[in-house]
Amino acid sequence: MYGLVFFLVASLLGYSVHATAEEIAVGNYGVSANGMPFGVALAKGYFKDEGINVTGLISSAGGGTSLRNMLAGGGVPYGEVNPGVVVSAILAGADLKIVSDNVLTVAEFVWAVKPDSPIKTIKDLKGRKIGYTNPKSTSQALANLLLESAGYKEGDVEKVKTGGFGEGVAALEAGQVDIVPITEPLWSKYKNKFRAIVAASDALPPLDNVVGVTTVEMAEKKGDFIRGVIRARRKAVKFMRDNPDEAAEIVAKQYSIDKDVAKSAILNLTKSTTQGVPYWGEGDIHLEGLKRMIEAQKKVGAISGDVDYDKLIDTRFLPDDLKKVK
């Protein structure tokens, strides 16, 4: 974790001021649903419309180790990452700020079983094995919350590390676990092969999943660029909601998935609300959801220490109608 923290800071601060073209760091881009709006914004020319030159999106397979690779390109004025990574970095001394709230729920998660499984509801898990990706991950934190919400005590259900969502599917098929989390767009690919027991949008409250981040130095040097990124992404979120077919064509190419899978994921997540909160936000800060996610990650040891949310968040780059913290 500490190596990640200092790499994150070094990468963001390493920006060369003479550059005119920029890249954006988007964790899990091309793999998970969170980054889809950035791809749509790039394809539709929304960054250019905002007067900024975004040449590409730096991706990763997710997790702390791969995030180092995602940011390896040098200067990154804006990145989209899990809030736990940001908070851990700040608590370790990094000068970072959350500048936008991008994914407001964990609605991309479902927990699924094999079709012939005797498990019918979340109440049937006692003595069973539930998969999660890696220690201190979001999936581990959510597994804990899910089990707590169903009234289980520690030890009632065995939690098994699978190493990844794809690996979790393989473990489920092999009978190594009884139930695993599957996220979009993987769920849209496999939804006819497995049976969903519970969706996060039905069982869990709004929990911030990814946020936009920059350094204090970048905030001073690249404020117009950051504002442009947030506005362009907002346009893309609206476009995906209003034009799922065209958005699916774009996402299918960028994620190397079938168009039907892309459209299913987009429709699922644009229509999803968790207690009235959408999956893809337009940038405005949902503080309660952020706090819930940080507390959940504290419980799995991903974060330790008190968080000063007033110092964590900088809303000046948001459009005026989105600056109010909810």
Image (tube, rainbow, N blue to C red):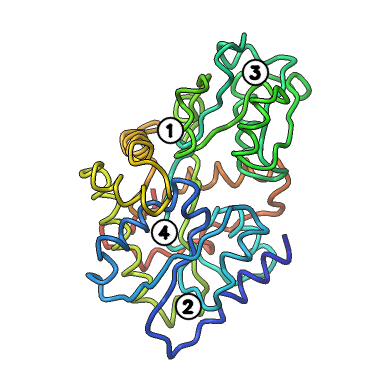
Closer to the camera in the image, 26 or 304: 26
Q: Amino acid at mark 2?
A: Met
- Tell me the quarter of the picture where residue 71 sits: bottom right
CA distance for labels 3 and 4: 34 Å
Q: Amino acid at mark 1?
A: Ser
- Relative image position of residue 21 (x, y in whole percent): 38, 80
Q: Position of residue 173 (x, y in %)?
A: 64, 25
Nearer the N terminus, badge 3 or badge 1? 3
User: Sequence-wise, which precedes: disc 3 or disc 4?
Assistant: 4
- Mark 4 and mark 2 lie on one chain; the one further toward the N terminus is 4
Which residue position is annotated with label 3? 151
Front-lying residue, 54 or 5? 54
Q: Residues within 10 Å of mark 1 (few under 14, many from 20)?
A: many
Q: Residues within 10 Å of mark 4 (few under 14, many from 20)?
A: many
Report the mark closest to the observer, 3 or 1.
Answer: 1
Q: Secondary structure at mark 1?
A: helix
* Upstream in sequence: badge 1 or badge 2: 1
Check whether the beta carbons of the residues at disc 1 and disc 2 lie within 8 A of each other.
Answer: no
**Alpha-carbon span between mark 3 and mark 1:** 29 Å
Other-residue count near label 3 (Cα within 10 Å), few / some / many at <14 / 14–19 / ≥20: few
Q: Secondary structure at mark 3?
A: loop
Q: Which mark, by number, is residue 218?
A: 2
Indicate which label's residue lies in the foreground, 1 or 2.
1
Report the front residue among 103 and 34: 34
| Amino acid type, residue under disc 3 in the picture | Gly
- x and y, in percent, of residue 222 in the image: 40, 79
| Tag shown at residue 100 | 4
Q: CA distance from mark 4 to mark 1?
A: 28 Å
Judged left or right of residue 83, residue 230 is left
| First in residue order: circle 4 vs circle 1 | 4
**What residue is rendered at 61% in x and 32% in y?**
169
Residue annotated with mark 1: 188
